[in-house]
Image: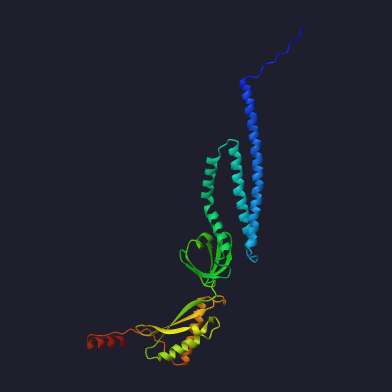
Amino acid sequence: MNTQTVITEPTALQNFMNSAIVTYGLKILWAIAVILILLLISKFIAGIVRRNIVKNWDPSNKHIDKIWKLIGDITFYILVIFSFFIGFEMVGFNVGLIVWGISFWVWLAFKEILGNMIAGIMILYTKEFKLGDVIEVQADQVYLGRIEEITIRYTVIRTLDLRQVVLPNMTLISVPIKTFSAEPIIKVTALFGVHYDSDVTKVLQVILTAVNSFDFVKEKTATKVFVSNFADSYIEIKSLFSFDPNCGLLTDFAIGYINEKVNDEFSKNNINVPYNILTVNFEKEEDKKNLAKNLSQ
């Protein structure tokens, strides 16, 4: 009995399917190879970014390890996402809409955290103010105090009443900030009042000597003391002096010490500081007598 083997020719559909599968498989392999190459490049670029941050940063900054790691990781993962995006596009899979949607919802969920982290990096990198600086932040209210801590997400300020205020870094880069200790010298004003019968020349000299007696007052030859206003019951004297913001004192405390010193000098030199006086005038003498009578009862 003869056995015959029947060999059928592949159809055009089979040829097309075989060629399409091979082509698609080659695309997948090529896409994987491209992704791996891009991942290596991403790691290399992230390493360069880290090294440049370390090179250009103050080595005494205790946050440098967190910052370079954070920036390096952000750089790496952005490039990783970009690499996979290219790989999927190469095999014909359109991921643009999916990536856009995921990115949008991630941004909505973490925009505050990411915003504060980016702001923290800007603050630490630009060094506009640093630990120990005295600043005035005009946020929902005015905060005046010394910076105790700067992290990636927030900054801690110790105010004059020793409260600890934690401010998001986004606040610090979006509101006006007045620095006091970032400069070598700042100008500070102190106000005083003396009686109208005082010897103004003597008063000016007493105040000038008292102000210049403190070590935190610099450039003493530039200290100014002058009459600034004639108020209802006193002569207003203003002193403008150069203050060392890095002396360890806040300006409010320095002015307080100066006020105490000036008050002592006023007492030694018999310089009167007037009280607020209320003057009552009567149209009729009879009204004055009636008021005196009622007060005496």
In-front residue for pair 166/88: 88
Q: Is residue 77 above or below residue 27?
A: below
Q: Where in the figure is residue 196, as x and y percent of width and height?
A: 37, 89
Q: Is residue 156 above or below residue 69?
A: below
In-front residue for pair 174/14: 14
Q: How is the image coloured?
A: rainbow
Q: Where in the figure is residue 20, as x and y percent of width and height?
A: 62, 28
Screen quadrant of the C terminus: bottom left
Observer able to see residue 50: yes
Q: Where in the figure is residue 287, as x and y percent of width and height?
A: 24, 86
Residue at 64% x, 35% y: name it.
28
Q: Where in the figure is residue 224, as x and y percent of width and height?
A: 46, 83
Give the farthest residue toward the right.
Answer: 1
In-front residue for pair 221/204: 221
Give the farthest residue toward the top.
Answer: 1
Residue at 23% x, 88% y: name it.
285
Observer able to see residue 297: no
Screen quadrant of the N terminus: top right
Q: Is residue 241 left or right of residue 66?
A: left
Q: Is residue 289 above or below residue 142?
A: below
